[in-house]
Amino acid sequence: MESLERVIAEHPFFAGLEPYYTDLLTGCASNVRFDAGTYIFKEGEEANEFYLIRAGKVALEIFAPQRKPIMLATVGEGEILGWSWLLPPYQRRFHGHAVVPVRAIALDGKCLRTKCEQNHDLGYEMLKRFAGIMEQRLEATLFQLLDVYAVGR
């Protein structure tokens, strides 16, 4: 059986993170599983965790009145799910739904915020990593919008 510390240290999101920080993160971590079709979180809910996806696939969706859910992106193995825990008001912006069974490490956002306040170097390291993810996802969404609303269709 793998230890949480090892799984966190080897996850691509935390590549190159100093072992001291991995120890701090492990204190906020737990193993979780979600069955296919399960909503991991819903828009508007309080955001108090994020997930390191170990296996499976999660769809990020938004709902519009009188329409089917609109899938914005999917997140899979080696990726992270959720950043709303990091920024006030700590509320989910989307729905996250397991497309297939998902195994993940859940990191408690309240625990991490406390540790980041106590150790600003850890906080800065987390902010840098999440900012990169946000940038990638925003760019992917922009390309998706360009494809949907391309001129000349």
Image (cartoon, rainbow, N blue to C red):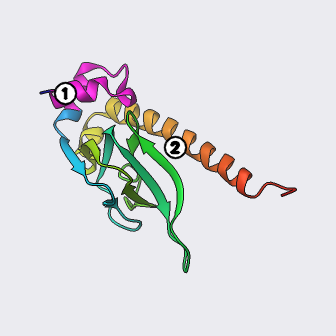
The C terminus, quarter of image = bottom right
Instruction: Decide whether residue 22 is among the magenta residues.
Output: yes
Q: Main secondary structure of the magenta part?
A: helix
Using the rendered view, name the quadrant where residue 24 is placed.
Answer: top left
SS state under label 2: helix
Which one is nearer the viewer's eye here, 12 or 98?
Answer: 98
Q: According to the image, label 1 marks what residue?
A: 5
Return the mark for residue 131: none
Looking at the picture, how far across and down is residue 91, in whole percent?
Answer: 38, 62
* 62 left or right, relative to 19: right
Q: Where is residue 44 in the image (x, y as percent from the top left)?
A: 40, 68
Magenta span covers which residues? 2-24
Q: Do the residues labelled 1 and 2 touch (CB within 8 Å)?
A: no
Which residue, given by chain and number where applicable, does mark 2 sit on? 134
For the N terminus, give its image quadrant.
top left
Measured as percent of width and height from the top left, residue 94 is found at: 45, 61
Confirm whether the magenta stretch covers residue 82.
no
